[in-house]
Image (cartoon, helix red, strand yellow):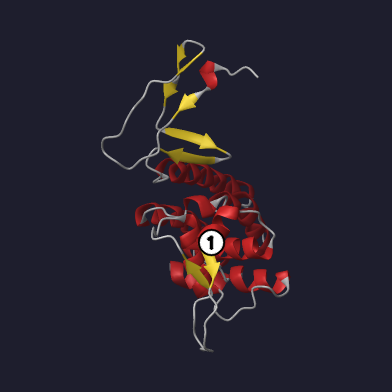
Amino acid sequence: MKLNADKTKVITFSRKTNYLIYEYKLLHFTITRTYSVKDLGVYLDSKLHFHDHVNFVFSQCIKMLGIIRSITFNYSTLGCMFILYFTLVRSKVEYASVVWNSITSTDANKLERIQQKFTALCFKRFFPQVGYCYDFALEQLKLHTLHKRRYHLDALFLIQVYRGSVFCPSALEIVGLRVPVLYIRDFHMFNVCSVSKNCPSARCASAANVVCRNVDVFGPKTLLMKHILY
């Protein structure tokens, strides 16, 4: 198989200030070094802060919200707005969130602004007589914050791995089931072997220990999904 040198990039993942930079060559051509690359729809930067991915998602979703605002000007039902938002906007925000959910609070607040704009639009269209407040709007529209949904998606991912629905051997190596010697009412289901809090598997285990505390994770899949995400 021949490789195209023009389409080949090299990137070094490290959070160190000084790290080794080597000049790689392919077919006597120097491979271009980059500090951000898109792989399977996720932008990976060299320090794995995911700033580029958040900026890309925010830009795409704000544009889509503008389109939804224009085409739904004469819509009379809130259900249609929900369908468009869930399908065209929120699905983009939550795509592969298990990979990049270690983002900073600044980036998390930036993504939350997407849903804030949507709830403000709904209140302006369907509840013009009610003063707008984001927390009150979430309660009235029966929505969760995007941060909370990503937290629950982390938990759901690990549960799906243990149920066999998702193949991820590395997660099973890092996260193990805890079996207490004595019966205790409150204990964590998963034991995390990794010491890094930014490790995706460790983050998912911490979320699952909280979200699935009183849930039969090996019970019916429909009930499990409903409990975690809705």
Residue at image x 45%, y 46%? Answer: 54
Choose between 170 and 146: the one closer to the eye: 170
Choose between 213 and 72: the one closer to the eye: 213
Choose between 71 and 90: the one closer to the eye: 90
Q: Quadrant of residue 78?
A: bottom right
Q: Is residue 32 visible in this depiction of the protein?
A: yes
Q: Quadrant of residue 47?
A: top left
Q: Position of residue 200 (x, y in %)?
A: 48, 56
| Location of the C terminus (image quadrant) | bottom right
In the displayed orientation, state which residue is furthest to the front. Answer: 181
Above or below 105: residue 206 = below
Q: Position of residue 167 (x, y in %)?
A: 65, 54
Judged from the image, the secondary structure of the residue bearing numbered disc 1 is helix
Choose between 15 and 39: the one closer to the eye: 15
Above or below 100: residue 183 = below
Q: Is residue 130 visible in this depiction of the protein?
A: no
Residue at image x 57%, y 40%? Answer: 41
Q: Position of residue 87 (x, y in %)?
A: 65, 53
The residue indicated by pointer 1 is: 154
Say which amino acid is labelled 1. Answer: Asp
Left or right of 220? Residue 13 is: left
In the displayed orientation, state which residue is furthest to the left. Answer: 17
Around disc 1, counting alpha carbons within 10 Å, would you say few (fewer than 14), some (14 to 19), or many (20 or more)? many
